[in-house]
Structure formats: structure tokens, C-alpha cells
Amino acid sequence: MVKLKARAVKNRLNKYNIYAEVDGQFLPVGRTINEFEYSLLEWPTKEEVINHILEDNRLELVD
């Protein structure tokens, strides 16, 4: 199984999101609410994002 390269990125609200590399560019990770809405996943600290990346077997942490 190929893992997606992922990194923690601070947003303008001083929270952190995961950005994963897809087709050569980093895109924010989120979840689909319904066919029209998409919600970005965010955490209050960088450490929590890094822990989530390390625990997710689909992601690989990069800087």
C-alpha cells in the first residue's frame, strides 16, 4: 500500500490542518458531509496533527 505524504500546516485561525500530496501537489485533508459540503479537519496544536498523521496508516509524515 502506498502512503500519501502529509504535513501539518498552520491556518489563518491559528489552528492546524493536514495537507497530503496528491498528483504532485499538497491538498488539505477533510471529510465529505454530503454531496455539496466538505469540512476540513483541523486541530488546535501541531503535536496533535503530527500524532494523527503517525497513527493513520494511509499517511506518511514529511516536513
Image: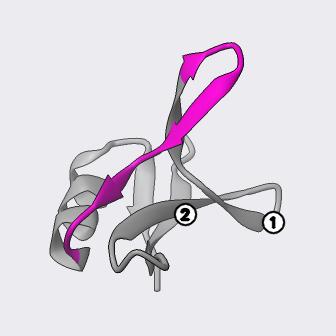
- For the image, the number of numbered tags is 2
Q: 29 left or right of 58?
A: right
| Amino acid residing under circle 2 | Tyr
Residue under numbered circle 2: 19
Q: Quadrant of residue 42?
A: bottom left
Q: Quadrant of residue 43?
A: bottom left
Q: Residue furthest right?
A: 23
Q: Is residue 4 above or below residue 24?
A: above
Name the residue located 43 percent from the left edge and 64 percent from the top edge. Answer: 17
| Amino acid residing under circle 1 | Gly
Q: Position of residue 25 (x, y in %)?
A: 78, 66
Name the residue located 17 percent from the left edge and 65 percent from the top edge. Answer: 48
| Numbered mark located on residue 47 in the image | none
Span shown in magenta: 33-45
Q: 34 left or right of 49?
A: right
Q: Secondary structure at mark 1?
A: loop
